[in-house]
Amino acid sequence: MIISFSGAQGSGKSTIAKRLAEKLKIPRYYMGALRREAAQKKGLTLAEYNKLGEEDPQTDFEVDEYQRQLGKKQDNFIIEGRTSWYFIPHSLKIYLDVAPEVGAKRIFTSLQKENNRNEDKGLETWKDVLESNKRRQESDRLRYQKYYNIDVNDPNHYDFYLDTTNLNVDQVYDKVERFVLSKNKK
């Protein structure tokens, strides 16, 4: 089984995907890390790289082709990425949502602990993160609409949708795990 995670910034995708991969003892692939690494190689933040991608489709195509090939060649893994569900249509598709303010606060807290995410410049407060997230979401929307004619935030694309705004990590994990295990038995 291939499980794809998508969702809003700060919704808990990485935390839950990592924990689920450990539980199921399967590999986890994180497209955000690949994009951050590609941005860093160009001397850019992720936000700058996304902006570049609005005119240069290659910034998306590299990661997207990687996902497509992974879905054709492997089985039994977890993949995180906004477009993973699209490039691996036979995956079990999970979308985690969160209120923008809550997501920004979660990311800001995470950045205080580990500031190697290469997110954006000037993220001094959670409100800075909120504004950066808004710009990033708009850039994502523009790119995915332009290159693939898809809306990655449309819940109709997913097998499981969960708003994590008022849930703690354990509650989110329990709900996701129950769903995945119910599908794995079929």
Image: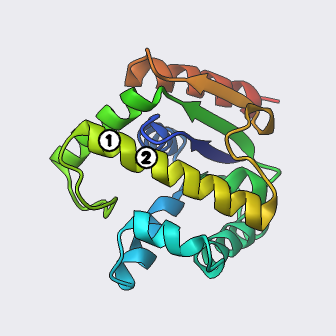
Foreground of the two, 54 or 18: 54
Residues tagged 1 and 2 counted as in contact (Cβ below 8 A):
yes
For marks 1 and 2, give the CA distance.
10 Å
Mark 2 = which residue? 133
Foreground of the two, 24 or 16: 16
Residues packed near mark 2 inside 10 Å, few (<14), some (14 to 19) or many (20 plus): many
Judge whether 183 appears above or below 4 on screen.
Answer: above
Query: Where is residue 62 shown, x and y percent of the image?
Result: 62, 78
Whichever of labels 1 and 2 marks the residue nearer the N terminus, that label is 1
Query: Where is residue 80 shown, x and y percent of the image?
Result: 56, 52
Q: Which residue does the image show at 70% across and 59% down from the upper left?
A: 144
The answer to whether residue 52 is left or right of residue 169 is right
Q: Which residue does the image show at 50% across and 38% down from the upper left?
A: 20
Query: Which colour style is shown?
Result: rainbow
Residues packed near mark 1 inside 10 Å, few (<14), some (14 to 19) or many (20 plus): many
**Label 1 amino acid?**
Ile
Mark 1 = which residue? 107
Query: Where is residue 136 shown, x and y percent of the image?
Result: 49, 53
Viewer can see residue 78: no
* Quarter holding residue 71: bottom right
Foreground of the two, 30 or 156: 156
